[in-house]
Image (spheres, grey):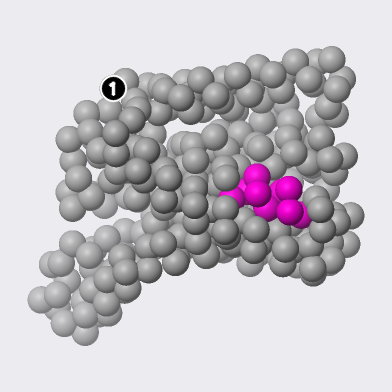
Amino acid sequence: MIDIGQSVILGVVEGLTEFLPVSSTGHLKIAEGFLGIPVDDRAVVGFTAVIQVGAIAAVLVYFFRDIIRFAAAWGRGLVRPEARQEHDYKFAWWVIFATVPIVVAGLLFQPLIKGPLASLWVVAGSLIAGSAVMWAADRFGTGKRSEAETTLPDAMLVGSSQILALLFPGFSRSGATISTGLLRGLDRVAATRLSFFLSIPALTGAGVYELKDAVGGGVDVLPLLVGTVVSFVVAYASIAWLLKFVAGHTFTAFVVYRVVVGVALLGLLVTGVLNP
């Protein structure tokens, strides 16, 4: 169903858009529409979830030292009560706790996610709606708190916001999480880094869960591997660029881009150039 050339294209799209607040799922569905790939086919949905693992691997490599630091603090806290006051120990638990809502939602709403919500109409509307949320976050977020000042409520709310992207492809997981972090008063770098750390368990779990549908649904293993490797390479570069960008810029460019893409997609759907 998906050949090597198509897997390369989808890997590039995934790597470029997974962590930028523009919606990787939305862009993948648009790309699949242009490539003539059925966006609501279970194997295709599984394929896109699996190649996300490449992007997650890029996060693991890029933030390797941070992850080791959190893991070490978590391990110390398990055996030494006094170490449980360390922020890194608490942060590690918060990432675990904040992943629970999206896991529950993913299991409960599978029929909707793989059915009526897997539509380009939903993508177009979500791109535009998500832009409004990002604009509000950029406009009203105070940006006064650093990563060291992150709290459990911050992590839970940011983690729960991933459900918006799960249910409405086009909303953007990174856009939802970063926006929520900004509205909680985190600065742009802290909100973006929290979004990255929360992506690790959520997207890894989704990729493993969907593997059976991708392979069992007619997608060959080689295209899966190619798409995953390409997404890793491109995502690594995207992570490095985004962290530098948010340190000195607002998200206005992303907001404008999302609105333009959303409106253009609506036009293509209305005129019949793309099938929903």
Q: Residue at x 21, y 80 (%)?
A: 76
Q: Residue at x 49, y 48 (%)?
A: 238
- The residue sitting at the bottom extreme is 79
Q: Is residue 229 visible?
A: yes
In the picture provided, is 32 more to the left or to the right than 94? right
Closer to us: 107 or 18: 18
Pinpoint residue 247: horizontal percent, then vertical percent: 29, 39
The magenta-colored residue range is: 7-15
Quarter of the rendering containing residue 22: top right
Counting other residues with Cα less than 10 Å from the Cα at mark 1, is it few (<14), some (14-19), or many (20 or more)?
few
Pinpoint residue 154: horizontal percent, then vertical percent: 29, 45
Q: Main secondary structure of the magenta part?
A: helix
Question: Quarter holding the C terminus?
Answer: top right
| 234 lies above or below 69 | above
| 251 lies above or below 45 | above
Pinpoint residue 258: horizontal percent, then vertical percent: 56, 25
Question: Quarter holding the N terminus?
Answer: bottom right
Magenta region includes residue 10: yes
Pinpoint residue 172: horizontal percent, then vertical percent: 54, 38
Is label 1 in a helix, a strand or a loop?
A: helix
Quarter of the rendering containing residue 168: top right
In the picture provided, is 248 more to the left or to the right than 3? left
Q: Is residue 200 visible?
A: no
Q: Which residue is mark 1?
A: 140
In the picture provided, is 230 more to the left or to the right than 201? right
Q: The residue under label 1 is which amino acid type?
A: Phe
Q: Residue at x 51, y 20 (%)?
A: 256
